[in-house]
Amino acid sequence: MALRFDISDQGAYLKCELLARDSAEETEQFLRAVREAALKHSASRILVSVHSPHAFFRVEKYKLSSYLDELASLPSLKVALVAQHFEVRLLQQYVEVLARLKHANVRSFGDQDEAIRWLRGTQPDGLPQAKAPG
């Protein structure tokens, strides 16, 4: 199996689907492609959907810290992570914790529709907006 992914502009967000990968190096290639596409499309909302059932928990093998540092430097950028497979969801939850420690706006979801609603919201933390008194 070789690296396979698809990146498409959905208007309100950039959809980045990781379909298959065998190594941390291929994960890093995918992250570089996501970064390049986000810069090219001036995207401030990114949906990363991982379809591959394999998780690589040694996140520094694909230089995740440097990507999270870059995300933290762009406070208007929101990244939603989505996966159906249990191990990948665990990894994405771990990535969300690391991102919060660095003040990067990254959230993990098990449901793509929920992730898209969060991306389209105006609150950076995904919390519902308070109603004005009256």
Image (cartoon, rainbow, N blue to C red):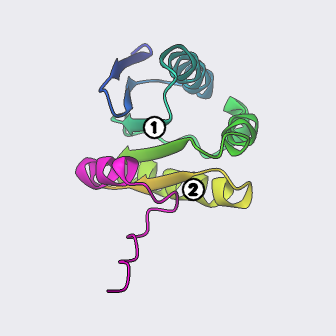
Report the magenta residues as a range. Answer: 111-134
Q: Secondary structure at mark 2?
A: helix
Disc number for residue 96: 2
Q: Residue furthest bottom?
A: 134
Residue 49 at x, y percent in the picture: 37, 37
Residue 131 at x, y percent in the picture: 35, 77
Position of the N terminus by quadrant: top left
Q: Main secondary structure of the magenta part?
A: loop
Q: Is residue 38 left or right of residue 101?
A: left
Residue type indicated by callout 1: Arg
> Of callouts 2 and 1, which one flags the residue occurring earlier in the amino acid sequence?
1
Q: Which image quarter: residue 118?
A: bottom left
Residue type indicated by callout 2: Glu
Q: Residue at x 54, y 50 (%)?
A: 106
The residue tagged 1 is: 45
Residue 9 at x, y percent in the picture: 34, 21
